[in-house]
Amino acid sequence: MIIPVRCTCGKPVAQLWESYLERVNKGEDRKKILDSIGLERYCCRALFLGHVDLIDTAAKFKKA
């Protein structure tokens, strides 16, 4: 999956994904990251916490 451009509430979130992913890979606490990048609503937080990056897996298969 690719991260959506906007959350269901309408807030643009796609530009925050790269910085979030970098900081998670460095080992920072996810709650502190979400607070610092300005994601306060539960829907936006759930979008980031529940996202599974499957684009690399899906790219291995070609259409028949």
Image: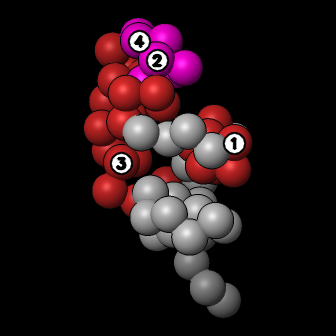
Query: Which numbered disc, 4 or 2, marks the residue closer to the eye?
Result: 2
Q: Is residue 58 magenta?
A: no
Other residues around mark 1 within 10 Å, as few (<14) / some (14–19) / many (≥20): few
Q: Magenta part of the protein: which range? A: 27-33
State the residue at coordinates (32%, 56%).
15
Give the label on residue 28, or none: 4
Above or below residue 61? Residue 57 is above
Frontmost of labels 1 and 3 is 1
Circle 2 packing at 10 Å, graded few (<14), some (14-19), many (20+), is: few
* Residue 41 placement (x, y as % from top left): 63, 44
Asked which secondary structure carries label 4, the reply is: loop
Q: Describe residue 18's horizontal placement relative to residue 53 as left or right.
A: left
Q: Amino acid at mark 1?
A: Tyr
Asked if residue 31 is among those painted magenta in the image, a careful observer would answer yes
Tell me the amino acid under the disc marked 3.
Answer: Leu
**Quick one: SS at disc 1?**
helix
Q: Position of residue 5 (x, y in %)?
A: 46, 69
How crowded pointer 3 is (Cα within 10 Å; few <14, some 14-19, many 20+) is rated as: some
Residue that numbered label 2 is attached to? 32
Give the mark, 1 or 3, whose residue is nearer the N terminus.
3
Label 2, secondary structure: give it: helix
Callout 2 amino acid? Lys
In the depicted view, which residue is nearer to us: 63 or 53?
A: 53
Task: Please tell me the numbered disc located at residue 42.
Answer: 1
- The reply to whether callout 4 and callout 2 are in contact (CB within 8 Å) is yes
Quadrant assignment for the N terminus: bottom right
What residue is pinned by disc 3?
A: 16
Residue shown at the point (57%, 78%) measured from the top left? 62
Mark 4–mark 2 distance (CA, rounded to whole Å):
8 Å
Check the picture and name the quadrant holding the C terminus: bottom right
Q: Earlier in the sequence, mark 2 or mark 1?
A: 2
